[in-house]
Image (tube, rainbow, N blue to C red):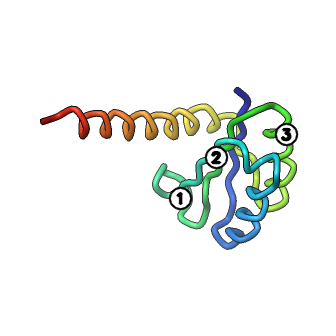
Amino acid sequence: MAWTLLSVPTSKRAELDAALHDDLVSRQSHKIRAAASLGGPADATYVLVEGSADAVRRAEELLREVGTPIGAAEREPLYRKLKDEDEAASAGMGLFFTEG
C-alpha cells in the first residue's frame, strides 16, 4: 500500500479538510494528528494518507498546496509511531472486550 505523510500548519485546517474531501482522496485511509502529540511542532498537524498509488499521488498534489512533505529522515519513524498508536488502540479495545 502506498502512503504519504505531510505537515500542515494548524492555521490551514479548512484547506486541509477541503483537500481530503477530494473524490479520490476521500476514499483512502487518512489519519490526522496534532504534531505536538508525536513530538512535533505545536502549530502543525500531521496527515497520513494510505491507499492506492494513484490516490496517494493525488493527495500529495492537493496537500502540497497547504503543507509540506515530511523529510526523509523523519518519515519512517513518524509513520511507525502512527501505526503503533493504531495497534495499541486496537489491542486496548481487544482487552476491553475480552476481560470479564
Q: Quadrant of the N terminus?
A: top right
Q: Position of residue 8 (x, y in %)?
A: 69, 59
Quarter of the rendering containing residue 92? top left
Between label 1 and label 2, give the one nearer the viewer: 2
Q: Along the line of sight, which residue is nearer the eye, 85 or 39? A: 85
Tell me: 3 left or right of 76: right
The residue drawn where x is 55% and y is 56% is 35
The residue drawn where x is 49% and y is 38% is 81
Q: Is residue 25 above or below residue 66?
A: above
Residue tagged 1: 34
The residue drawn where x is 81% and y is 31% is 53
Query: Badge 3: how crowded within 10 Å, few (<14), some, or many (20+)?
Result: some
Residue tagged 2: 30
Query: Badge 1: how crowded within 10 Å, few (<14), some, or many (20+)?
Result: some
Q: Is residue 32 above or below residue 49?
A: below
Query: Badge 2: how crowded within 10 Å, few (<14), some, or many (20+)?
Result: some
